[in-house]
Image: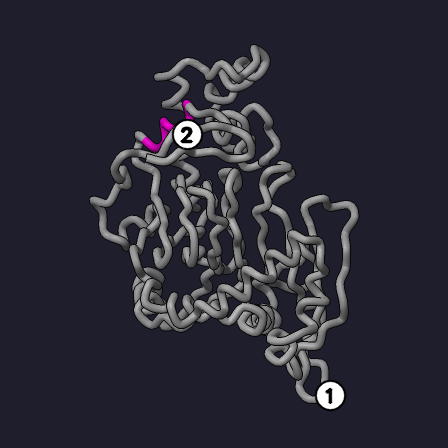
């Protein structure tokens, strides 16, 4: 058993034994929006990519020490992998976003011809908490959070290739034939592509609050743990709503909720549609506190069988097909080691 700590909140301990609901087949779980756990799926690839993952750890250290990402990428080994196809245009620093560290812009080239513009790598902190140095590198294109990325598969593919150039360990997922065969079976697809790629570093006291990654045109997310260990809570939105209501009927509101927050939560659980609306808004502080920052609710979900622990080489598949069944997930770093992971969106290639 290990202690669960995230952003200064003590949330109990991991279970003494696995509580995952593993009595269903992978296809049934996927279709219901439940996570699919693939233990040791990428374990055989980790050793040959040790140099790459160590290089990536050095890049993370440079960012933590306030070096510019663009200046690091202008040196070996990155420059040789980026050029001549990807030409750096320098960095953009968004002073209005305190979580963003740096966005490095690229053009994709074919000789002297520009074949795609506005590709980017964005480095961001995962939280505002002073003791959490968790961060991520995200690759995409265009206007972030505004552009419909699924509408431009050409630039989406080039952004994926940009990821390969900066982080060659991406092939731990993209070249894993057994994993690809499993995904083709789950999606009933002739092929799959890995797009909208993220390289995660979850550090001690860090991790992600409950959220989803629903995006038009994407079937789900594949998450591969490369170093370190993480602990997950993962369940479909419709299940999460039911569990919040079930918790309210079986357990007193945690002491950390003020009287005003308790009244608001009582109103929410009395109106399922309103609860679903507020859950999707990511803005209701009473709800956010209950489901992410109270030991009582975290332990309730663990006891209900929604937890999974990932160690190096493990993979977790998270369905993200519809708003009702998309798999919401929450992540904790376990232990004192900052762990690296790959998180790629899955797109069926019909």
> Of marks 1 and 2, which one's residue comes earlier in the chain?
1
Mark 1 highlights which residue? 112
Magenta residues, start to end:
296-302
Write the residue at 37% across / 31% down.
13
Mark 2 highlights which residue? 298
Of residues 135 and 275, the one nearer the viewer is 135
State the quadrant of the C terminus.
bottom left
- In the picture, measured across the screen, residue 225 lies left or right of residue 134, that is left
Secondary structure, magenta segment, majority class: helix
Write the residue at 49% across / 38% down.
210
- Between the C-alphas of marks 1 and 2, the distance is 54 Å
Write the residue at 43% across / 42% down.
335
**Few, some or many residues within 10 Å of mark 1 (<14, 14–19, 20+):** few
Measuring from the top left, give residue 277's x and y in whole percent: 54, 33
Q: Evaluate if marks 1 and 2 touch, with contact meaning CB atoms under 8 Å apart.
A: no
Q: Secondary structure at mark 1?
A: loop
State the quadrant of the N terminus.
top left
Q: Which numbered disc, 1 or 2, marks the residue closer to the eye? A: 2
Of residues 210 and 133, the one nearer the viewer is 133
The residue at the far right in this view is 95
């Amino acid at each position: 058993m290990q202690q669960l700590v995230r952003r200064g909140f003590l949330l109990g301990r991991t279970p003494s034994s696995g509580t995952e609901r593993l009595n269903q087949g992978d296809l049934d779980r996927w279709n219901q929006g439940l996570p699919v756990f693939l233990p040791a799926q990428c374990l055989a690839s980790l050793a040959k990519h040790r140099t790459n993952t160590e290089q990536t750890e050095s890049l993370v250290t440079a960012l933590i020490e306030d070096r510019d990402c663009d200046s690091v990428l202008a040196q070996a080994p990155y420059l040789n992998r980026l050029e001549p196809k990807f030409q750096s245009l320098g960095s953009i620093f968004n002073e209005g976003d305190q979580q963003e560290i740096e966005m490095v812009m690229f053009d994709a080239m074919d000789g002297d011809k520009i074949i795609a513009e506005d590709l980017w790598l964005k480095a961001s902190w995962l939280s505002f908490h002073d003791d959490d140095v968790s961060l991520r590198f995200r690759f995409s294109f265009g206007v972030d959070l505004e552009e419909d990325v699924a509408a431009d598969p050409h630039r989406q593919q080039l952004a994926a290739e940009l990821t390969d150039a900066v982080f060659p360990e991406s092939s731990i997922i993209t070249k894993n034939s057994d994993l690809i065969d499993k995904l083709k079976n789950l999606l009933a697809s002739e092929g799959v592509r890995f797009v909208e790629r993220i390289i995660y570093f979850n550090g001690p006291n860090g991790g992600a609050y409950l959220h989803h990654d629903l995006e038009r045109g994407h079937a789900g997310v594949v998450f591969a743990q490369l170093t370190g260990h993480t602990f997950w809570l993962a369940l479909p939105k419709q299940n999460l709503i039911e569990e919040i209501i079930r918790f309210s009927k079986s357990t007193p509101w945690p002491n950390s909720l003020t009287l005003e927050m308790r009244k608001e939560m009582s109103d929410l659980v009395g109106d399922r549609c309103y609860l679903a609306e507020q859950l999707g808004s990511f803005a209701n502080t009473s709800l956010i506190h209950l489901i992410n920052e109270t030991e009582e609710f975290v332990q309730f979900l663990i006891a209900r069988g929604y937890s999974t622990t990932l160690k190096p080489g493990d993979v977790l598949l998270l369905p993200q097909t519809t708003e009702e069944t998309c798999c919401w997930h929450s992540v904790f770093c376990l232990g004192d080691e900052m762990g690296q992971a790959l998180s790629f969106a899955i797109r069926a290639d019909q």
